[in-house]
Image: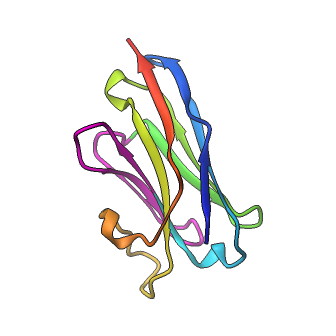
Amino acid sequence: VQLQAFGGGLVQAGGSLRLSCAATRRGFSRYGMGWFRQVPGKEREFVAAISWSGAYTLFADSVKGRFTISRDNDKMTGHLQMNSLKPEDTAVYYCAADNRLRRESILYTSSYEYDYWGQGTQVTVSS
């Protein structure tokens, strides 16, 4: 599956952005999905994950209560709603997907568990 992330931009601290991730292949509904972010010189960091039906979600402590993750399998898209943004949220954000066999409740936080990646979208939060 090919993924394309979009929706990034420049926003003031306290503002909101909604990132989207569009998939190109049917069968997306069987893929777990995640969002990661990366700043120069640092490793890619887990942000959030959602199971293939959307029944299960997981968030990094740093974004819990501020970010939500969702998906629309009919439209083959996923979303990351980011509220109360902080300057430290500034990064390139990537969406990712995997189709590994497992219980739906198991969500991955390691980038190594994801097989498919979007190209990234820049999010900049000004103070």
Position of residue 37 in the picture relative to residue 26 (left or right) = left
Q: Position of residue 43 (x, y in %)?
A: 24, 49
Q: Position of residue 65 (x, y in %)?
A: 40, 39
Identify the residue shown where x is 37% and y is 23%.
86
Q: Position of residue 105 (x, y in %)?
A: 42, 75
Placement of the C terminus among the 4 image quadrants: top left
Its colouring scheme is: rainbow
Placement of 47 over or under 106, stated as above or below: above
Residue 42, quarter of the rendered image: top left
55 in magenta: yes
Can residue 16 be seen at all in this image of the molecule?
no
Placement of the N terminus among the 4 image quadrants: bottom right
Q: Which of 105 and 42 is in front in this view?
A: 42
Residues shaded magenta: 35-64
Placement of 101 over or under 67, stated as above or below: below
Identify the residue shown where x is 36% and y is 40%.
63
